[in-house]
Image (tube, helix red, strand yellow):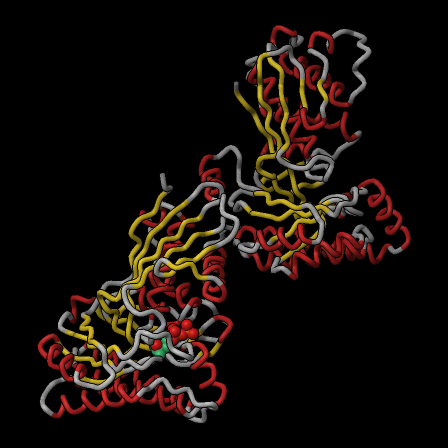
Amino acid sequence: MWKTSACGKVILLGEHAVVYGVPALCGALQGGVEIEAISGEGRLLVPEWDVATPPLRDLLLPSHADISSSLAIAMKAIVESLSVAIGRPLVPQDLPYDFVARFAIPTGAGLGSSAALSVALVRAIDRAAELGLSESDVDGAAFAAEKVFHGSPSGLDHTVAQRGGFGLFRRGHGLSPLPDTPTLRLCIGHTGKARDTKGRVARVAELCQEKPDLTAACFARIGVLVGEAVDALRRRDFVALGQAMNENQALLKLLEVSCPEIEQVCKLALDAGALGAKLTGGGGGGCVVALAPGREQTVLAVWQAAGYSSFLVEVGGDTRTPSTAATADRTRTVMHAVASANTNIALCKYWGKCDPALNLPAVPSLSLTLAGLTTHTEVRLDPSLQMDSLHLNDREVSGEPLRKVSRHLDRLVRQLGLSGRPFAEVRSHNNFPTAAGLASSASAFAALTVAGYGALVGERALEQPLDRSLLSSWARQGSGSAARSLFGGLAVLGVGTPGQVDSAQATQLLAPEEWSDLRLVIGVVSDEAKETSSTDGMTLTANTSPYFAPFVAAAPRDLLEATAAVRGKDLALLGRIAERSALRMHASAMAADPGVVYLRGSTIEGYHAIVRSRREGIEAYFTCDAGPHPKALTTAAHAERVAAALSSVPGVKRTIIAHPGEGARLISVGVPR
Ligand code: DP6
């Protein structure tokens, strides 16, 4: 007929210390309990436990023999509390329904299932009897039920169940909501051992007597960590949040509330890439909570393989505000986005990294984005998928290329401050040879960045697109040259500052139409994939070539002069710089140990053909990337003759004439039908 629901809860930081006045950071577990109303006589049914309370008319009898189960006593406590709140007794005619409760979270695991049940039941009774309860009426009735289940509970659970979102709970002060916090996806792993809240609380009390200095220091530090975690949560800084969780876990261990099973479940999560992992709630057993943005499925798989039951939850958000609910839905609905990006050819070469982990270039570079050499990429984020998949030119690809794509999408999730993502199906098409030195990684990662961003953010990506330079920095982390493909025409990618992830971004120097007369002629030598990737080639060069340092030293001046040449549309100057930058890059690569030699006979012959053409008055300048294809920078007027000269080079199979193209483009975003 109709349904009500309420949230479970998870304590993210601060359990046990909360007993001693430190605030605890807790969040609502979305989808805790759902209650369905069906026609009936005021009973509460819990099919999972195979129990039902007596009909309301029996429950209301002054002495009924069957009111021994805590469920029936809780139901009665709710009815009595509501009768006081509405100023008249609730009667059986008020509730011509039975209420069927279903749990989406494990019960008895410290995740607030009883509080969620109490709140959802009060809401169901409110709706069934059209009582028009206030929030404080709901609060009072749910707390009455919680007292039946737990004796003297703190009130944290049912308050979180009712309010949703994140909050700071302080003993004696209740829950202060934390607005402006994101929805987090968290992994919950069950140790398989019953939690021992009572016993552990008692042990901490003993410790306070035995080692007062130690416990006081622990509580003080946990208080600081809770504050840091709140800040990190607000900033969507999941690394910092994970660190706070880990340190809190270490302190909980000192307070003797952990156990070997909890330690093992935490270790498995951290080894599988979680940023933070700790016990949640009473400890001594029970559940572990792990923060592993983008790696949730790996953590769950590792736990399951080790025999620990586990599941994924969404924590926080606000169940009552549609905007955050929509964000939460993003991880539940299928999202699809399509983007395209043109490749680019560097005229001042990027070769070598100053921070390989962040993929920051050691030198600045300048490039021309080429129309017609395009990657189209579709990203479909689908909660029903079991793993990421990649199709490249209609062929399924696994191994390292798939891992790179997964890692890139995970990075986007982090950059966007999202709590996670569903698995993705990525389909990418290149209309030119892949990995043969036509810089396919540039268009590939530019298109993946834009499509991934679209799928993760939804329509907002079209309505309020992000700054392209920022997107270029994200693309750069997939592949340096990809940053420049965010822009059309002539673009510059700056040199990086080690340790600063967004320190190298691309910018546009000239739009394609501002120098539309430029042409790049490519002599295609081979459609085969190259033997050494650019990444490997530049790493070997940086590590072993005595010519790498001079290459890096010369690069800034090349860029300065090339920038001036572009602004002045001085092809002769730009061409001369492009030629020397390419030759120096290859010279430094060839001087590596072992040598990195991309040039073939046809490449060298192509170079001579271009230089010869120049002597004959044709404006053309050589360049070449990490592959064998000779390329010439020229003008529309000379392009055909340059193409003819390159075609006559033995080994050149065909030529491509490309003109300045557009930057990466988000083509569509939406929920597929
Ligand atoms: C020779 O961008 O492919 O094409 O950042 O390691 O992915 P990674 O390298 P990549 O290197 C391109 C090298 C180049 C020169 C250039 O495009 O600037």
Q: Quadrant of ligand 1?
A: bottom left
Q: Residue 131: name its quadrant.
A: top right
Q: Quadrant of residue 482?
A: bottom left
Residue name at image x 44 percent, y 61 percent: 397
Residue 82 position (above or below residue 321): above
User: Which quadrant: the C terminus?
Assistant: top left
* Residue 137 in view: no
Q: Nearer the viewer, residue 222 or 316?
A: 316
Is residue 89 at least partly visible in the picture?
yes
Residue at 34% across / 89% down in the picture? 584
**What residue is at 31 percent from the left and 87 percent from the top?**
600
Q: Residue at x 18, y 89 (%)?
A: 609
Name the spot of residue 324 as percent of width and height, x first: 48, 40
Residue 404 image position (x, y, % from top left): 47, 64
Residue 327 pos. (x, y %): 46, 42
Left or right position of 475 against 32: left
Q: Nearer the viewer, residue 453 or 22?
A: 453
Residue 610 place in picture, x, y as percent: 18, 87
Front one among 569 and 547: 547
Residue at the farthest right position: 210
